[in-house]
Image (cartoon, grey):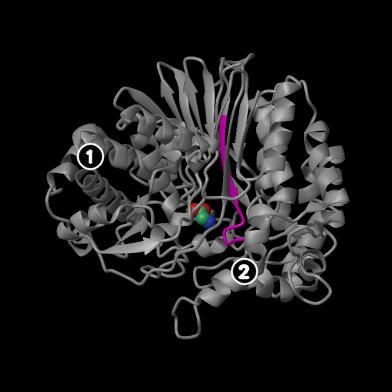
Amino acid sequence: MLRLVFSLVVTVLALLPPPAWAESAVEARHGMVVAQEARAARIGLDVLERGGNAVDAAVATGFAMAVTYPRAGNIGGGGYMIIRLGERPRGPIGPRNIAIDYRETAPAAATREMFLDEKGNADPKKSRDSAHAIGVPGTVAGLALAHERYGSGRLTLAELIAPAIALARDGFPVEDDIADSLPRARTRFARWPASAKIFLRPDGNVLAPGDMLVQRDLADTLEAVAQRGPSSFYEGPIAEKLAAAVQDAGGIMTADDLKNYRAHLRQPVRGRYRGHEIISMPPSSSGGVVLIEMLNVLEGFKLGDQDDASRLHLMIEAMRRAYADRAVYLGDPAVVSAPLARLMSKRYAAKLRTGINPDRATPSREIRGDVLLPREGDNTTHFSVIDRYGNAVSNTYTLNFSYGVGMVAEGTGVLLNNELDDFAARPAAPNAYGLIGGEANAPGPNKRPLSSMSPTIVLKNGRPLIVTGSPGGSRIITAVLQIIVNVIDRGMSAAEAVAAPRIHHQWSPDRVLVEQSLPNEIVTALEGRGHKIERRPPGTSANTILVTPRGFIGAADPRTRGSLAAGY
Ligand code: GLY
């Protein structure tokens, strides 16, 4: 009888669909791309199969997502890339860890007061919904720089952009996450005729699932970049059209702002966590510094031995303290000199740990400052790439809001960002993610607004172990933290680490965001320690690669419809 019941249970289990996280993990031996949109991931994979390296594949994926994932993939926005080279570059010895900062900049005419109303209060309409919100786009410069300096040399920029051009010209059916996200952007597109032509049907509704998304002007712009290089975007007719469109909409960006734009090569920030090396993004993103500060604090606790609520409590307390420092110290390194070494030191972490009560939440106001009202949003996209030569690339880029400011610059097909909302419009005014910034992140001419994007590579014994990152505004850094803790402290597989419920605290407002899937008993235990909990839908999507002795496991985040881990 018992055997019958047992075999029945086994049969039923075998017939059940696998859990979502199991479906999203893919194993490969030679190379892998994990991205939030399947066509773009396959384009990157094809580059790897043709002998391109991880940087080539990342560049091809990045240009493709500007077409296939227009809510965040872009050439009208900006972002960050972390590269780990398998070998030292030839020629004069160069570093193996590289950060490319292709964040948007404020126009030269930007002022400290540009996002204030007549009473001197922050005016979110200006910083989010007007042409003043548009930063000078950095993506074309950033991807071209990556290809020129770190591509394999086996594939030209034109070859890497070609699939994106074809998809823009021929179109592709609206499905998955684009179909989910377009309706929420309808009113933004309706404001701008050049956007409405592309994303709305003649009846004024957004394209529906199965409709073809065709972007002919974007194909022409990409063709120009493919044939004549990035300068064709930053100078000449395309730049003039971009500047004219922004100015016609009341903005201040000029053709000179575009001509003067530069992507920067930077030294990544580096930390150590339980014998692993963390390589992440330095300012103008806060991501790497805040991540390393949190990991340093947590290294002093045996996280693997804690029950769920105790571990999460300690993580929340680390988050609270690191985000408080973010608000005060971090900004564009061209303007602000932040005490990075101190913030990322083990000594400072030890000091922060002494203030953590293992049984009680520390009210954020006891750490510093006021508690302000939140506003959250989803945006940005991340992809991770690894190749058979030992190179890895972690890339996060964005238009800020989903579909940016919603404005396509007439005659270019380029959808523009509203990234300048990431400045602190005035000290203590929260941006769209509820993040507060001080003077360090005030708007200013040619300045880069502070970001949370955190493309990260974790090394073990000098080789990549985890390649990760996420969209999600202020929630990005804590999502990356949780991937690392899930793998290193909790011994999770890639798929489990990515699928596990996430939490987030950012010092202000003083509350913990938790995904619906976090069990009630853990929430109750956290509340018992004094945490204020808010359930939130997921806003992050951490497309991650884990390296194993047998190859690579790619985990596309099941939170986004259409994400794909593509390997060979
Ligand atoms: N726009 C979101 C970020 O840069 O973090």
| Residue depicted at 88% across the width and 49% down the height | 170
Please tell me which residue lies in front, 9 or 153. Answer: 9
Q: Position of residue 77 (x, y in %)?
A: 64, 53
Please tell me which residue lies in front, 305 or 6. Answer: 6
Boundaries of the magenta span = 393-403
| Residue depicted at 63% across the width and 42% down the height | 263
Q: Establish if 270 lies above or below 17.
A: above
Instruction: Rate crowding at label 2 as few (under 14), some (14 to 19) or many (20 or more) other CA atoms within 10 Å.
Output: few
Residue 200 picture quarter:
bottom right
Closer to the chain start, of discs 2 and 1, is 2
Instruction: Rate crowding at label 1 as few (under 14), some (14 to 19) or many (20 or more) other CA atoms within 10 Å.
Output: many
- Quadrant containing the N terminus is top left
Q: Position of residue 531 (x, y in %)?
A: 22, 60
Q: The residue under label 2 is which amino acid type? A: Arg
Q: Name the residue under label 2.
A: 184
Q: Is residue 293 visible?
A: yes
Residue 102 as seen in the image, left or right of residue 219:
left
Q: How many marks do you count on the picture?
A: 2
- Report helix, strand or loop for mark 1: helix
Answer yes or no: disc 2 within 8 Å of ligand 1: no
Residue 264 as seen in the image, left or right of residue 474:
right
Which numbered mark, 2 or 1, is in the foreground of this view?
Answer: 2
Q: Is residue 251 visible?
A: no
- Report helix, strand or loop for mark 2: helix
Q: Name the residue under label 1.
A: 349
